[in-house]
Image (cartoon, rainbow, N blue to C red):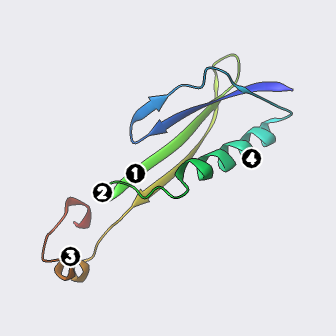
């Protein structure tokens, strides 16, 4: 078993994993990162029109192994902007 660390970044705010998780393989760490990230974002609608959540995974050497990232973005087309009262948001340009 190897110790893997899953550091979370949520819209630019970093949360360091100080405990780590024992897993049998890199593939297990990838699966755990996917499962954990989906659990983190489940049921949480992004504030506004954009949210990016990522897990940066590394081992004891602190060497980055991989990143799993989810990006939520609302991009409104012109007719949708008109339908919500004519407000043009930066993400619709």
Pointer 4: what residue? 31
- Residue 4 drawn above or below residue 74: above
The residue to which callout 1 is attached is 51
Q: Could you tell me which secondary element the residue under label 2 belongs to?
A: loop
| Label 1, residues with CA under 10 Å away: few <14, some 14-19, many ≥20 | some
Circles 4 and 1: CB distance less than 8 Å? no
The answer to which quarter of the image holds residue 19 is top right
Do the numbered discs 1 and 2 sit on residues whose CB atoms are within 8 Å? yes
Which numbered disc flags the more N-terminal residue, 3 or 4? 4
Marks 3 and 1, how far apart in space?
20 Å
Q: CA distance from mark 3 to mark 4?
A: 39 Å
Q: Residue at left 61%, top 50%?
A: 39
Circle 2 packing at 10 Å, graded few (<14), some (14-19), many (20+), is few
**Residue 32, position as x, y percentages in the image:** 72, 43
- In the picture of the structure, the residue carrying the numbered disc 3 is 81
> What residue is pinned by disc 2?
48
Going from N to C along the chain, the mark reached first, 4 or 1, is 4
Q: Nearer the viewer, residue 47 or 54?
A: 47
> Spatial distance from mark 1 to mark 2, Cα to Cα?
8 Å
């Amino acid at each position: 078993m190897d110790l893997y660390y899953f550091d979370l970044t949520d819209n630019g705010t970093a949360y360091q994993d100080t405990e780590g998780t024992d897993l049998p393989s890199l593939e297990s760490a990838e699966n755990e990162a996917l499962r954990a990230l989906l659990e983190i974002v489940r049921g949480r609608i992004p504030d506004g029109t954009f949210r990016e959540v990522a897990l940066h995974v590394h081992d004891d050497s602190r060497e980055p192994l991989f990143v799993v990232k989810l990006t939520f973005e609302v991009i409104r087309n012109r007719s949708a902007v008109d339908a919500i009262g004519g407000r043009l948001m930066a993400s619709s340009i």
